[in-house]
Amino acid sequence: MCRSIKTLRPPMTDEVTDDDIRAAALQYVRKVSGFRRPAAHNEAVFDRAVEAVTQATTDLLADLRIRGTHT
């Protein structure tokens, strides 16, 4: 599932931007929902899901402890 989402943690990726995280979240929500673009009546819930996944990913990356890195 979501094979096109790249790994966003060190040492796989040196620098991760907010855009990288949001793109991964968007890809995840698209895959799970089955919609590339939601219909107008689903747009708000789709956008909320993208924001929730973006925040969860940001929190995860901020709290991960990776051996061998000094961040």
Image (cartoon, grey):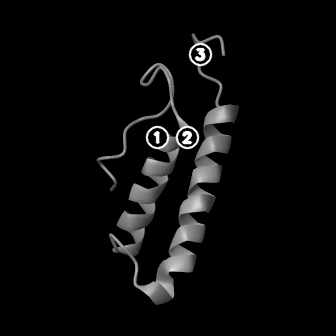
Give the residue number, with chain letter if any, for mark 2: 18
Quarter residue 31 falls in:
bottom left
* 10 Å crowding of disc 3: few (<14), some (14-19), many (20+): few
Q: Nearer the viewer, residue 23 or 12?
A: 23
Q: Secondary structure at mark 1?
A: helix
Q: Amino acid at mark 1?
A: Asp
Contact (CB < 8 A) between labels 3 and 2? no
Residue 44: assigned label: none
* 10 Å crowding of disc 2: few (<14), some (14-19), many (20+): few
Q: Secondary structure at mark 2?
A: helix
Q: Nearer the viewer, residue 41 or 27?
A: 41
Mark-to-mark CA distance, 1 and 2 = 5 Å
Residue drawn at point x = 55 percent, y = 40 percent: 18
Quarter placement of the C terminus: top right
Vertical arrangement, residue 21 with respect to residue 36, above or below: above
Q: Amino acid at mark 3?
A: Arg
Mark-to-mark CA distance, 3 and 2 = 23 Å
Q: Secondary structure at mark 3?
A: loop
Q: Amino acid at mark 2?
A: Asp
- Residue 38 percent location from the top left of the image: 40, 78
Residue at the left extreme, as displayed: 4
Give the residue number, with chain letter if any, for mark 3: 67
Quarter residue 53 falls in:
bottom right
Give the residue number, with chain letter if any, for mark 1: 20
Contact (CB < 8 A) between labels 1 and 2? yes
Residue at the bottom extreme, as displayed: 41
Quarter placement of the N terminus: bottom left
Residue drawn at point x = 50 percent, y = 22 percent: 10
First in sequence: mark 1 or mark 3?
1
Residue at the front extreme, as displayed: 40
First in sequence: mark 3 or mark 2?
2
Q: Is residue 8 left or right of residue 61?
A: left
